[in-house]
Image (cartoon, rainbow, N blue to C red):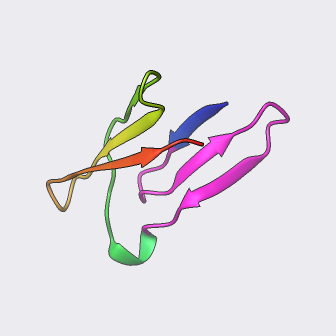
Amino acid sequence: MKAQHNAVGDLLNLKAQLNAVLDADTSSQKISSADMGYNPLLRTVFVPTLTHNTIKAYFIK
């Protein structure tokens, strides 16, 4: 599984079958995301935001 995001701030999980699953839709909040990081030990994706000067963290099940 590979987590990806887009500039709008949507966080997607790409599963082995290449099906994208929308995990977080932040488009209504107008949050632009930057480069993301993944910590496999914590199974957590970290997504810096451009417009809100924050870092969002998402646990991957």
Total number of numbered labels? 0
x then y, percent, for residue 1: 67, 30
x then y, percent, for residue 3: 56, 37
Front residue of 49 and 55:
55
Q: Which residues are magenta?
A: 5-26
Which residue corresponds to the image point at 80% horizontal and 37% vertical from the top-left? 18
Q: Extreme bottom residue here?
A: 28
Q: Extreme right residue here?
A: 17
Residue 32 falls in which quadrant of the image?
A: bottom left
Quarter of the image where the C terminus is located:
top right
x then y, percent, for residue 37: 37, 30
Left/right of residue 17 with respect to residue 26 in the rendered view? right
Which residue corresponds to the image point at 63% horizontal and 58% vertical from the top-left? 22
Q: Extreme left residue here?
A: 53
Front residue of 36 and 38:
38
Q: Is residue 17 magenta?
A: yes
Residue 49 higher or lower than 14, as above or below: below
Residue 30 higher or lower than 15, as above or below: below
x then y, percent, for residue 8: 42, 59
Which residue corresponds to the image point at 44% horizontal and 70% vertical from the top-left? 27
Residue 44 falls in which quadrant of the image?
A: top left
Residue 35 higher or lower than 20, as above or below: above
Q: Is residue 13 magenta?
A: yes
Left/right of residue 10 with respect to residue 19 in the rendered view? left
Which residue corresponds to the image point at 14% horizontal and 54% vertical from the top-left? 53
Q: Extreme top residue here?
A: 41
